[in-house]
Amino acid sequence: LPAFPAAEEDDGADAEPDMRAMVRAQNQKKKKSGGFQSMGLSYPVFKGIMKKGYKVPTPIQRKSIPAILCGRDVVAMARTGSGKTACFLIPMFERLKAPSQAGARALVLSPTRELALQTLKFTKELGKFTGLKTALILGGDKMEDQFAALHENPDIIIATPGRLVHVAVEMKLKLHTVEYVVFDEADRLFEMGFAEQLQEIIARLPDCHQTVLFSATLPKLLVEFARAGLTEPMLIRLDVESKLSEQLKLAFFHVRGDDKPAVLLHLLRSVVKPQDQTVVFVATKHHTEYLKEASGIWGCPACTPLLTAQGIRCTHIYSSLDQTARKINIAKFAQGKCPVLLVTDVAARGLDIPMLDNVINYSFPAKAKLFLHRVGRVARAGRSGTAYSLVAPDEMPYVFDLHLFLGRPLLLAGAQEMPADADGVLGRVPQSLVDDEECLLLTDHEGSLEVRSLRRVADNAHKQYLRSRPGPSPESIKRAKDLDVSQLGIHPLFSAHFEDTELERLKFVDSIKTYKSKATIFEINATSRTLASTVMRSKRRHDHALIEKYQRGQQEKRAAALQGQGLCPAAPGPEEGEGGEEEDLQDVFSTVVGQKRKRSRRGEDGARKKPQQPAQRDKDFYIPYRPKDFESERGLSVGGEGSPFEQQAAGAVLDLMGDENQNLNKSKQLLKWDRKKKRFVGQTGQQDKKKVRTESGRYISSSYKNNLYEKWKQKYKVDERDEDEEDKRGREQFRGKHRRGHGPRQPPAQGKVRSELKNKQQILKQRKKAAKQRFLQSGGMKRLKARNRQRVQELRQMAFGRRVGTAKKGKLRKRV
């Protein structure tokens, strides 16, 4: 055979040992392929992975790690909790191999402090056996410690963009040795306004570096960034259609805004298991202080928080909380000392609690992407979890926006029976449960003046939050108005605990509450012959057909809702837009790995509609008014829908003169003479100088320096120590050239820093020296010389100890 030339030349005796070896190798037990063993990792990296307890890589790890190891620029998109952190750490360890004195070779940028600290912890655990040094650059920490950390030549820098730019400007840091850059939660970096800082950091990097972007969502703004800043990037996206984990269950409760504390208390006390860990997301920090008082006096009996007074141990986190208190509260929650954690959206990203079981949305998020990252804290790494959402009447449009973004119908609790663990059902909470909890809360409010004041502050903060909250889409507002909340049934999570008689009683009470008379005030007395009753009867005869048509439409809607048919379409149909997303991604990324979006089958599950005439469209020339991924991209948008309006409004500003002295002076300060235009123009404050926005929200010039680095070097004499170390190394290298012997050359010793602490001998010597100096400065030497001269004169007058007079012998001698 031409494919096996060796079989014709060799005899069977020579081939027999090879066959035995092949059979022996085949019979050996091997580990399954597709794991970390088949990736060709070095032993220190593989040992750290096994020590961490990882056995089989996740789908995103199996797709992205080999591509990153090949040196390609990668943009990876996967849902929260799929193991994205290990996707960029394992290739980073494999590329760096061992420590080096050249400088930092890897840079990891994180949007928040919590995510950076979590990445640092994971880096130390996973790279335990590599020996690589890591420096952490975060806002809120001492810059002197960060200067010292960068002077030790770390191999990896984990930083937030604002503080890294500040340190780089102070130290004139070039970052020319960095060869591996990671943007963790890339969409969050752009959403928080770090675009200027990222451009400043990228300008300091070398041209030949590998860039990796990881995020749970990938809006088109990042696609534009990938087109501009990456070289032949590879897009890896998994679970595009299923944005939520399959192990996550959703529950929506329609409640009034005033009943939310009572419903939250009932959920934590009766629905959630006592041993489960629960995260409660609220709108503002004042809500956290109201639900869990942050007075700073721990264990004070007079300061009884709302939940603690009801026997629920909880802790809290918000943005302006002290860093030390934030670390303590996270540790208390992670260790299980407090099963409930009250947070704002500052912890929606990056907070990784491995054993987290439940998430409660006390305030429903205004953006679908924010909901995705809130509930992404649970059901991670194969675990199951539940997300409970308290929906007020004004938050119903956001629920419809969420289901449009997720591409799934909204199920309404109706007359038919549903299992208690039904997923994605919107229902009401029984009023009897709310009344029981309200009685307990009312007692707490009457007994504590501080709780009442916190409630008032929380209400005022909620009003401010409503003003700044982005509005929902017009389509969702229309659907929310069409929804008849009075026909909404009790959520199956609560109805499973009630008997049939109790359910009938609740339905009867609801029917009384929703009763509406069919007659107007003019028709109550049918026997009256007034002009008003006559006009109303004639009007009813005239509008009888329209009224019946409207009532039939309402009955059909209620019947469709009772049959469980979705009120919210799963996704916009093909008539609303033909796609262009796949073509755009193919143009930007050289390789796209992952499944494509599935077409939803609305004809099978959706409501039956009247047959319509087919649309007359020309496939070659028809342009849809919006793409098919419009709802999904609107949920993933980073820049916001108001950015084009702000750009247009900036060009149409009309500066008016004030009518008061204060306003006039203010306008004079804002105007500046333009030599080219020959008139006064308004100053924007950021057109003349290039400024960068720090993490605190303050704009600083990119070339601005406080000379903190120079002061730090003078304080610790860093330049002198560096010169001494260089001289010592130079002498050792010079001696090494002329020494005898052929043994291996030892590495140069690091220069020792002289201790500033003194021992006992040095302190005693310094005290003696100071005492002698004080003695001489106070004229002690003159007094000593005068005393010696006086004694010499007395000795001369004594005649060798014998004094003329009545003095006895020896007295003067003894005195001398």
Image: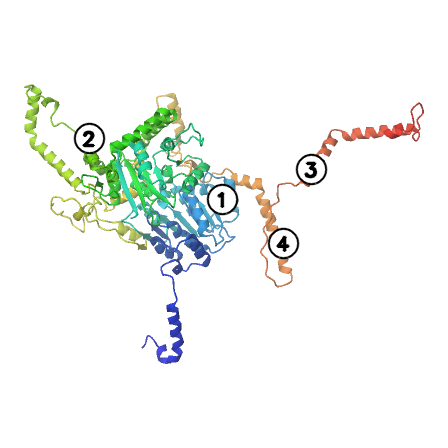
For marks 1 and 2, give the CA distance: 73 Å
Amino acid beneath label 3? Gln
Mark in front: 3 vs 1: 3
Which of the two discs, 2 and 4, labels the residue nearer the N terminus? 2
Q: Which marked residue is nearer to the observer: mark 2 or mark 3?
A: 2
Q: Nearer the viewer, residue 351 or 434?
A: 434
How crowded is the residue under tag 4: few (<14 C-alpha within 10 Å), some, or many (20+)?
Answer: few
**Amino acid on which disc 4 is placed:** Arg
The residue under label 4 is 731
The residue that appears at 66% across and 41% down in the rendered structure is 759
Q: Which mark is residue 766?
A: 3
Q: Quadrant of residue 631?
A: top left
- Give the vertical position of 49 relative to 443 (above or below): below
Q: Position of residue 88 (x, y in %)?
A: 40, 52
Left or right: residue 606 compared with residue 154: left
Observer able to see residue 131: yes
Q: How far is disc 3 from disc 1 in space, using C-alphas? A: 42 Å
Task: Give the SS element for disc 2.
Answer: helix
| C-beta proximity under 8 Å, tags 1 and 2 | no
- State the residue position of label 2: 509
Q: Would residue 262 appear left or right of 478 to someone viewing this image? A: right
Between 60 and 287, the one lying in front of the other is 287
Give how far across and how far down residue 400 sits, in percent.
Answer: 24, 39
Residue located 23% across and 43% down the image: 419
Q: Position of residue 125 (x, y in %)?
A: 45, 50
How is the structure coloured here? rainbow
Which is closer to the viewer, label 1 or label 2? 2
The residues bearing labels 3 and 4 have C-alpha atoms spaced at a distance of: 34 Å
Per the image, label 1 sits on a secondary structure element best described as loop
Checking the image for residue 172, the label placed there is: 1
